[in-house]
């Protein structure tokens, strides 16, 4: 086996491409597509997004200290891309993409009603890294489309047709290969539909 050696670069894929909504009170809310995002702590629940200073959303998030991470689905794929190539300086992205601002539970910034999951966040720390600033945030609340719940109230995220981003391209999640811990489980129960309880068993 031979390998090519490349210069340092971002090659951690697949990752989510999320729509981050933000807004100042009294002004039109905005959406920025973010791929540099990830979970960083379970307790407290925290995540991070990396945003370039020149983005219109940067100042909004910095000043308000709030944003909502909206998961993206097959239906939202076009809007996800569009919100990542057009600026809120020039467009009302909610209006252009026919999206509905969703009043948040714990923060002032709105979520996106059409997204399967909305993660309300408060910024705790901003770290200057170079091209991007890292916004480290605490999750204040999560809202879930109740059509994704099964009859026992468990979240079935497989129904959401979530989108992943890999090396410049969008993909819909495909075949299920196993579930958390399946590699060491005595019996596999992979024939069952993928379901998730409200409080996940597989905490990292
Ligand atoms: C798939 C995708 C991922 C992106 N990821 C990021 C990111 O992680 N951080 C960032 O600052 N910009 C990212 N962008 C670019 C911004 O979304 C884009 O510049 C957007 O127009 C900024 O909007 P705004 O000026 O309204 O804030 C991404 C764009 C796309 C299409």
Image: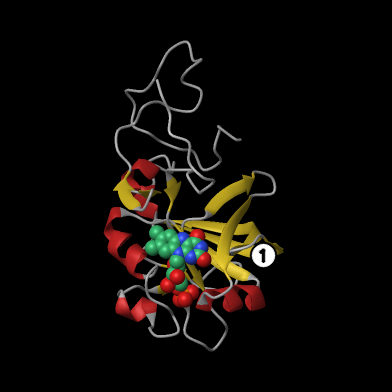
Callout 1: SS: strand
- In the rendered image, residue 63, in percent from the top left (x then y), is placed at 65, 78
Which quadrant would residue 201 be assigned to in this image?
top right
Task: Report the image quarter containing ligand 1.
Answer: bottom left
**Residue under pointer 1:** 123
Neighbours of disc 1 within 10 Å: few (<14), some (14-19), many (20+): many
The C terminus, quarter of image? top right
In this picture, residue 146 sits left or right of residue 29: left
Query: Tell me, what colour scheme is on the image?
Result: secondary structure
- In the rendered image, residue 164, in percent from the top left (x then y), is placed at 38, 48
The residue shown at (67%, 65%) is: 123
Seen in the picture, residue 75 relative to 166 is either above or below; the reply is below
Which quadrant would residue 52 be assigned to in this image?
bottom right
Seen in the picture, residue 169 relative to 33 is either above or below; the reply is above
In this picture, residue 70 sits left or right of residue 67: left
Q: Depth check: give the residue in front, 164 or 41.
A: 164
The answer to whether mark 1 is within 8 Å of ligand 1 is no
Which quadrant would residue 77 be assigned to in this image?
bottom left
């Amino acid at each position: 086996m031979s390998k090519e050696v490349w210069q340092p670069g971002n090659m951690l894929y697949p990752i989510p491409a999320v729509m981050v909504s933000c807004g100042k009170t009294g002004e039109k809310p905005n959406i920025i597509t973010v791929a540099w995002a990830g979970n960083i702590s379970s307790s407290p629940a925290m995540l991070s997004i990396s945003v370039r200073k020149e983005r219109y959303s940067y100042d909004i998030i910095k000043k308000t200290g709030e944003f909502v991470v909206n998961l993206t689905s097959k239906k939202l794929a076009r809007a996800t891309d569009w919100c990542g190539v057009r600026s809120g300086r020039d467009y009302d992205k909610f209006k252009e993409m026919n999206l509905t601002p969703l009043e948040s539970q714990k923060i002032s910034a709105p979520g996106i009603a059409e997204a399967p999951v909305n993660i309300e966040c408060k910024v705790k720390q901003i770290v200057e890294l170079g091209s991007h600033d890292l916004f480290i945030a605490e999750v204040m609340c999560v809202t879930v489309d109740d059509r994704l719940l099964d009859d026992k109230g468990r979240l079935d995220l497989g129904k959401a047709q979530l989108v992943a981003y890999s090396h410049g391209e969008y993909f819909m999640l495909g075949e299920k290969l196993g579930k958390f811990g399946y590699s060491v489980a005595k019996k596999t129960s992979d024939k069952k539909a993928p379901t998730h309880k409200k409080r996940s068993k597989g905490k990292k």
